[in-house]
Amino acid sequence: MKQLIFAVTFLLLCISFPTMLGAAKVEVEGKAWLDSQKDPAEINVNGVWGSEEWGDFHLIQAEGSREVSGNGGGYDITGVVSGKHLFMLFSTRHTVEYCGTVSPNGENSLSGTYSNRKSRLHSGLCQESSRPMNMKKK
């Protein structure tokens, strides 16, 4: 009986260990998603943005650049502007937790959606179901 318990425990550890390593990383899956957004930037999102859902976002986008970095809602933000859309990854310790896409919605306002990352048991970056996201320039 002890051997059976040991074998089952060992098997569960072997099965779960690779899934713990399988979380989407900003530098791999996240970079691929951001790199697939290829249009030149038509907007600049540099500054502080407020969101009821997330609190304040502090975004940095150099003039003429597509790349965006910053923080908000307790997460590191890595993103890219493609056309009039901001594509963002919300991460902790380089692991993607959420993906978001917003675009201008009137003066000094961005709106769009965000979604949770996929389970560590599934491949890919973020789930298809999403929730609304709104940001206003402060």
Image (spheres, grey):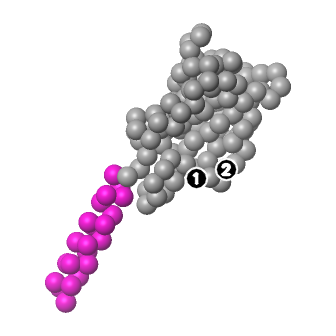
Which residue lies under the disc numbered 1?
Answer: 127
| Mark 1 closeness class: few <14, some 14–19, many ≥20 residues within 10 Å | some
Which quadrant of the figure has residue 136? top right
Q: Residue at x 77, y 22 (%)?
A: 108
Q: Looking at the rendering, in which quadrant would you find the N terminus? A: bottom left
Where does the magenta region start and end?
1-21
Q: Nearer the viewer, residue 43 or 137?
A: 43
Q: Is mark 1 on a helix, strand or loop?
A: loop
In the rendered image, the quadrant that contains the C terminus is: top right
In the image, what residue type sits under mark 1? Gln
Provide the residue designation for mark 2: 130
**Residue located 69% across and 42% down the image:** 113
Residue 4 versus residue 87 in the image, above or below? below
**Toward which corner of the image does residue 81 lie, by quadrant?**
top right
Marks 2 and 1 in Cβ contact (< 8 Å): yes
Badge 2: few (under 14), some or many (20 or more) residues near its Cα, within 10 Å? some
Question: Does the magenta-highlighted stretch encompass residue 6?
Answer: yes
Residue 137 is situated, as x and y percent measured from the top left of the image, at: 73, 23
